[in-house]
Structures are given as structure tokens and as C-alpha cells.
Amino acid sequence: MTLFYPLLDTFPDTRLGDSIALNGCCLTVSSMTESMLGFDVSEETLRCTNLSDLKVGSMANLEWALRMGDRLGGHLVSGHVDGLAELRSKSLTGDGGSKLQIACPKEWARHLIKKGSLCIDGISLTINELADFEGESIVDLTIIPTTMSETTLAVVEPGWRFNLEVDMMAKFVARLQTWRD
């Protein structure tokens, strides 16, 4: 399947084969017109991400993939989505920010820690609180006004499925702990 997205002024140097993250999912530009970018999306990607939830006109977070030498303003994010998390609640704060509570699948809970990093829809965030319940972990996040205004977090509502990417270093540590020679 080919997914098309409007070509924005912020991507003027885009070429075929470039990597661009769409809602935190690293995709390869497979076609272009003067106004649209095309991405080939596999059934596996559609199954594991929220890309199939997007409709014509849906807002999405779009950014260049990180290149060696780029400034890193958050934690390491690969664009390889681990699973889906669901927005359970959203409340506005008095300063224009928001508090989010999301439910993450239990299988990813061991990679989450309080004050650790988590990526939802390509947005690198810090975990404020973490609680484990039956089959899932509930994560509390505080979103600053700038993040609210510059991302899709301003428009998502409870029930939204976020693309979830847990901390890469935590995944490496977990894998090393299971390794046997």
C-alpha cells in the first residue's frame, strides 16, 4: 500500500529514498509530486502502528530521520515502533500544557521507569509516574505548551492509539540480560 502525505515547506530538499518519520514511524519516500510525498507501507507496518487509523486530512507528526552529527534534543529514537499505547485521559493545565495518561501493553512495561524516556507518535517524552495494573502499565506524562502547539497532542482525544517506542538502551539491556553463551 502507498500512503500519501502533503509535501510541506519544511521538507524542500526531499529526495526519493529519504527517511522521514510519520507519527514516529520511519518510512522511506517512494514517490513524490510537487505537493505530495508517497511512502510504501507494508502490512506489518499497518498492523503494528496507527498509520491505518489516519484518514484524509488527519494531522500527523512529520520529521526527518536523525542523521549522525545532528543535535539530539531528546532520547535516541529509531522510528521502529514497538507497539501501540492508548490515550486514557487528557486534561489541560493552566499554562497551556496538558497531562496525559496512557496505557502501554504489559510486554513493554519492563522497559519503562519513572523519569525515563518514552516516545509516542515520534514525540520524545519523560515519564512522570508509572503504575502497573492487570495486563498494562499506566503512564502519566506532562506536556509543555510548546509540545502541545507543535505536535498532534493538541488534537488527540481519549481512545487515540499512539505509536509507542520504548527507550532503545532499555531494550539493549533487556536483551543482554537474556543472552546465554
Image: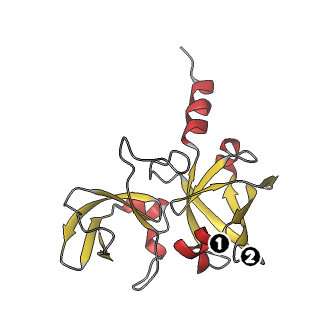
Check the image and tell me how it is coloured: secondary structure
Q: Position of residue 160 (x, y in %)?
A: 61, 74
Between residue 173 and residue 133, name the one nearer to us: 173
Q: Quadrant of residue 56?
A: bottom left
Q: Is residue 151 visible?
A: no
Residue 145 is labelled as: 1
Other residues around mark 1 within 10 Å, as few (<14) / some (14–19) / many (≥20)? some
Judging by the rendered image, the residue that carries numbered circle 2 is: 95
> How many badges with numbers are in the image?
2
Q: Residue at x 49, y 49 (%)?
A: 77
Sequence-first tag of 1 and 2? 2
Q: Is residue 118 left or right of residue 151?
A: right
Mark 1–mark 2 distance (CA, rounded to whole Å): 7 Å
User: Relative to 156, is 64 above or below?
Assistant: above
Q: Amino acid at mark 2?
A: Asp
Q: Position of residue 58 (x, y in %)?
A: 45, 82
Q: Is residue 128 visible?
A: yes
Other residues around mark 2 within 10 Å, as few (<14) / some (14–19) / many (≥20)? few
Q: Residue furthest bottom?
A: 57
Q: Position of residue 109 (x, y in %)?
A: 70, 47
At numbered mark 2, what does the secondary structure look like: helix, strand or loop?
Answer: loop
Image quarter hosting the N terminus: bottom left
Q: Is residue 46 left or right of residue 162?
A: left
Between residue 37 and residue 132, name the one nearer to us: 37
User: Relative to 49, is 108 above or below?
Assistant: above
Q: Are marks 1 and 2 in contact (CB under 8 Å)?
A: yes
Q: Amino acid at mark 1?
A: Pro
Q: Residue at x 26, y 56 (%)?
A: 18
